[in-house]
Amino acid sequence: MATSEGAREPWRNALFDSLLRGIRIQSTVFFRPEFRAPWGVNIARDCGVFHIVHQGSCWLQVKGVDEPVELSEGDFTVITHGTPHVMRDQLSSPTENFFELVKRNGNGSFSFGGEGAVTRLVCGGMTFENRASNPLLAILPPVLHVRRTEPDAKRWLGHTTEHVVSELDSPGAGAAEVVTRLADILFIRAVRTYFDRNIETASSGWLAAVRDVQIGRALAMLHSQPQQSWTVPTLARQLAMSRSAFAARFTELVGEPPLRYFTRLRINAAAARLRSGNEKLSVIAAAAGYESVAAFVRSFRRHIGMTPGDYRHFRDRCPPPSVGV
């Protein structure tokens, strides 16, 4: 039976590096609300949403997550898929729509609530490049939560969030771009904290697959060589497993069949090349392991929802980062 020994192998870090390199925040919008108890807001956004508790404390309740999360001053949390959620001073406080409050006040800095204790937040929406096919976004839990009091977070979370606030206060050129890059850093560090916290204990899902010596190595091969024309038999041979045992074990741990996972990985790599340059489609298709441009275009459209040409054009007209203050 496979054990977690593979979790200590060099390929594990290489695999995590591959996932984290693929994360790029396309644009951000920031809000800086000040709430006084009693208060409550409900939020739903078709993108990643994060919150920094700059002062005070509050409760976070995410749809589909059983237990509410208590957030303290300095904490950082990400609702990875923009799932509807509620934030409030007490679990019994009524809520209003966050974006209605933004609209009512005309900008991202506003006050709301009663006359009690103050909670100040820095909130943001993060639109990820290529989120439809990015393997990292597919494996993350609905909520990432980093407490400022955690030993590792003490070294980076406070400094980075203070830098965010400083840039939001700055009228200087490039502030919007700086805070977007800082959001990149915050998100990547939060993901790394999640990996470190759960890699040795995960009993199911992608992290459990990484702990499995054979399936973990398969994932490492797929991520390090997406241009290879991998098949279930070739992967199984590399791991000294039968085809059926490999396919069943991979599907059980990862949550999808190996070739479906691999196809999404190849499309994600191709999308990254489309974003970063002007190579011919034939070159990108070949690098992604497709024998023809037509086959690549069909697969790309099925996963991304548009042709590679349309995707490249969309990249060229993407809006710049914005700051909602």
Image: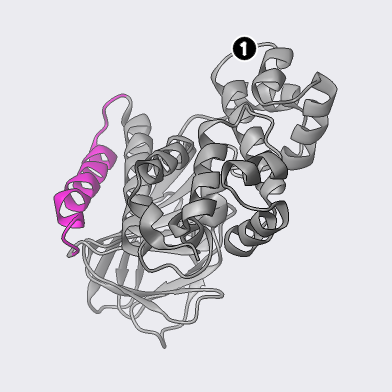
Q: Is residue 258 left or right of residue 295?
A: left
Whole-percent x, y for residue 2 in the image:
48, 62
As drawn, 116 above or below 263 = below
Figure quadrant of residue 283: top right
> Viewed as shown, does residue 74 lie left or right of 303?
left
Q: What is the x, y in percent for residue 114?
A: 32, 78
> Which quarter shows the C terminus?
top left
| Position of residue 215 measured from the top left corner of the image (x, y, whole percent) | 54, 53
- Of 72 and 148, nearer the camera is 148
8 in magenta? no
Residue located 67% across and 57% down the image: 256
Mark 1 element type: loop
Q: Nearer the viewer, residue 125 or 142?
A: 142
Q: Residue at x 31, y 48 (%)?
A: 189
Q: Is residue 235 visible?
A: yes
Which residue is at a point 59% across and 48% down the rendered structure image?
Answer: 240
Number of other residues with Cα within 10 Å of mark 1, as a class: few under 14, some 14 to 19, many 20 or more: few
Residues drawn in magenta: 150-173
On screen, residue 278 above or below 227: above
Q: Is residue 224 above or below residue 276?
A: below
Determine the residue positioned at 74% across, 14% down: 282
* Residue at numbered disc 1: 278
| Above/below status of 282 relative to 110 | above
Whether 163 is among the magenta residues is yes
Residue 122 visible within the image: no
Q: Quadrant of residue 310?
A: top right
Name the amino acid, label 1.
Asn
Residue at the bottom extreme, as displayed: 92
